[in-house]
Image (tube, helix red, strand yellow):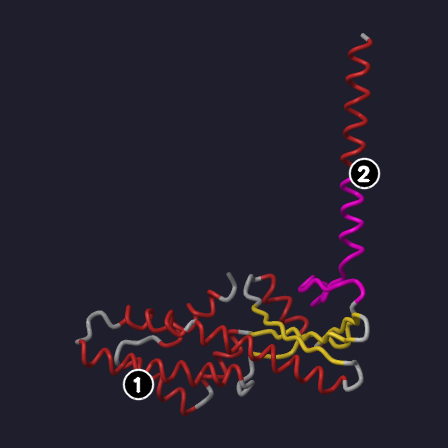
Amino acid sequence: MLFENNWLLWTLVILSVLAGGLLLFTFLQQDQYQWITADSVKIQSIPKAATIVFVNNSMEKRVAELYKAGKLITFRGESISGGIDTVTAREKAKMNAFKELAEYFNAKIQTFATLVEGQLQSVSEPKSQQIKSIALDAYKRVTQMFSGAQVSGAYVYAIWEERVGSLVYTYVLLVFDPAGAIEALKQNDEINRQIEELGKSGVDFFKALNSVIEEAKK
């Protein structure tokens, strides 16, 4: 009977310790972070000590929709300054975020080429190489438009700052909206003509581009 009572007591003690540890861990985690949100949806965790200086309220609903659909693609830019010229610091962080976007698409050019090749299996070698070259040229032009913010679909959603000693770290969260970007491309007559010509040769440009974009979400 004494053994059973001791066993019950120790079980309660162990469970209490585990519960206390879990609560402490949860408290510490909450204490270390705050969140950038979109329409009450948590999008990006940032340090508790950071100061949120901008949220693109006009895009909150769209960003939340992308997140809920598993289609939210973000890139983050950073700059370090003395905290005096905040305008320049934020612009630099923004440019670095767009640079991250550009580097992603540039790194995926071989993936795109392989996808195009897969669509040209029934085309003779000389002709297929010519079509592939045109497709890659279109891809490069499109990704330059993305990274240069020349089409809608890539926009700054949030900016926050974190002071570390005498330095201020400025961060920009850039959202890439595939649907908005592709829709904008379709409105560009020059690009659209090139993509239509590729279609006549059996290349579904947007299908290949979408596959590259899908990989950004993994």
Residue shown at 74% from the left, 86% from the top: 87
Residue 3, image x, y percentages: 79, 11
> Is label 2 or label 1 in front?
2
Where on the picture, by quarter, is residue 110?
A: bottom left
84 relative to 44 in the view: left or right: right
Task: State yes or no: residue 22 in magenta.
Answer: yes
- Up the image or down, 152 lies above or below 35; here it is below
**Quick one: which residue is furthest to the top in this view?**
1
- Up the image or down, 11 lies above or below 46; here it is above
Disc 2 residue crowd, few under 14, some 14–19, many 20+, Cα 10 Å: few
161 relative to 154 in the view: left or right: right
Residue shown at 43% from the left, 86% from the top: 141
Which residues are drawn in magenta?
Answer: 20-49
**Quick one: which residue is furthest to the bottom in this view?**
190
Where on the picture, by quarter, is residue 89?
A: bottom right
Q: Of label 2 and label 1, which has the lower sequence position? A: 2
Residue 99, image x, y percentages: 56, 79
Residue that badge 1 annotates: 197
Residue that badge 2 annotates: 20
Residue shown at 60% from the left, 61% from the top: 68
SS type, badge 1: helix
From the viewer's side, name the closer residue of 137 and 182: 137
Task: State yes or no: residue 160 in magenta.
Answer: no
Disc 1 residue crowd, few under 14, some 14–19, many 20+, Cα 10 Å: some
SS type, badge 2: helix
